[in-house]
Image (cartoon, helix red, strand yellow):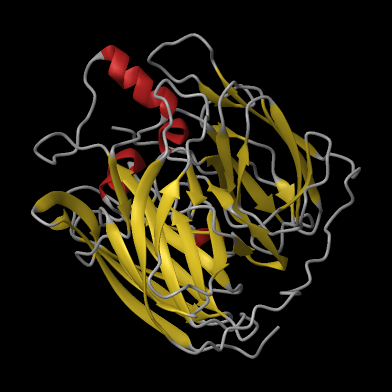
Amino acid sequence: MKAEGRTVAYDLQASSFNWEIAPGKTIQAWGFNKQLPGPVLRANAGDTLVVRLANNLTEPTMIHWHGIRLPASMDGTEATQRPVAPGEVFEYRFVVPDAGTFWYHSHVNETVQMERGMYGALIVDDEADPIVDGERIFMIDDMKLDKNNAFTRPTWFLPRMVERHDGRQGDTLLLNGREDLVINVHGGQTERWRFINSSSARYFHLYLGGREFKLIASDGGLLEHPVTVTEALITPGERVDIAIGPFTEGETIAVESLAYNRTTFLRSKRETFATVKVGASRPSVAAIPERLRTIEALAAQDAVVTRSVELSVDPRIRDQKDFRINNTVHGNDKPVVIGELQVWEVANTSRMDHPFHLHGFFFQVIEENGKAPAHRAWKDTYNLTPRSTIKIAWMPDDRPGTWMYHCHIIEHHAAGMMAHFDVVDGSKPYEGNATTHVHHHH
């Protein structure tokens, strides 16, 4: 453990405002500090973050700090706090213990609030970070707008059902709140690009025209070794950091998402989100080491499973709660005891992909469909392909309270694919899940 860090304070105001996503194209966004995405919050590992949220919206809201190992009372869900009413101020205060790429977003009426722009990046730095020539944060989103650039809501049964099944995907493609973003870089430079998929349901299959880049970090920070690839799948809620470069002066690179078939009614297609333009060369100081850090294995591949979690979808098409976990909707799962290693088998019995997100804790995937993963990483969101099973290991540390896990396709979460569970102190009698969970879904 490092010496205690400093205190870093931010003010966030949630409100409705006009936002220009392209020249002459304005939307009525909801967000933080009249920016889309909201401001980038930055701290060093070990610092205490203090964020005062003032709610100037006409409905309640609150903030979930995605990927941060914080106290349950600060997790920003209806299991742990009363939503912040219009006109109220709430102060979040917690230590950010881990370096990495995180994000914050609304956890109330998410299908409306997140769709309209209620999210931002939270970056935690550390002296162990590799040296690069520059760094960029890219928040991936899309919006479903009508010809007047207003947010649509399906009213008829069929489109409503398609949107519930697929999750809400739109044709307005945004990177950092802009359509057709141009990214200007210098030749000879190697940069760290932090990607955060903040969309409701879009699977972003990163492709840079066949150019190789290195995966250097995932949800829970640095990998053990850089992994050289030409494409990377980033599902809703996930983060991927890459080292890219050196660039060649004069070249132009499209930032694309390749088609990815996640079994939806609407066909996936290859799409361009932004363009990289390379200017004059500059000398480089970048150094990406072959070993980024050591990640100790929490459990062996054949570790005994302590809990089974099943994600399922009722195959009959109907407009009701058919997205389930352990055959319940918005269920309560058994408690876990502080200090007892968790080995969960998470099975997706449906015919569609689901990104599984665990609040408050990182896990290691120790097996996927019977095989050990190619490299070790700390994750909080992991994609389950159709009819697949993963085995994850995680350790509940001394942060008792109510937590949750859910599918990070926002519409599936709203439709019931989530569950609460308590982390409890084994030396004390367990009183049962005291909170009655009320869900407001408009």
Above or below — where is 255 with respect to 306? below
Which residue is at the far front?
250
Query: Hey, which quadrant is residue 431 in on the image?
Result: top right
Q: Quadrant of the C terminus?
A: top left
Of 404 and 163, which appears nearest the observer? 163
Picture coordinates of residue 79, whole percent (x, y): 48, 47
Picture coordinates of residue 435, whole percent (x, y): 51, 43
Report if residue 266 is visible in the image.
Answer: yes
Judged left or right of residue 120, residue 398 is: right
**Residue shown at 25% from the left, 37% from the top:** 144
Judged left or right of residue 46, residue 107 is: left
Report if residue 68 is visible in the image.
Answer: no
Image mark count: 0
Of 253 and 193, which appears nearest the observer? 253
Picture coordinates of residue 436, whole percent (x, y): 48, 38
Of 165 and 11, which appears nearest the observer? 165
Judged left or right of residue 154, residue 217 is: right
**Residue shown at 25% from the left, 53% from the top:** 179
Judged left or right of residue 57, residue 37 is: right
Picture coordinates of residue 373, whole percent (x, y): 78, 48
Query: Hey, which quadrant is residue 277 in on the image?
Result: bottom left
**Residue shown at 53% from the left, 87% from the top:** 284
Q: Quadrant of the N terminus?
A: bottom right
Above or below — where is 398 with respect to 311? below
Above or below — where is 255 with respect to 263? below
**Residue shown at 49% from the left, 41% from the top:** 408
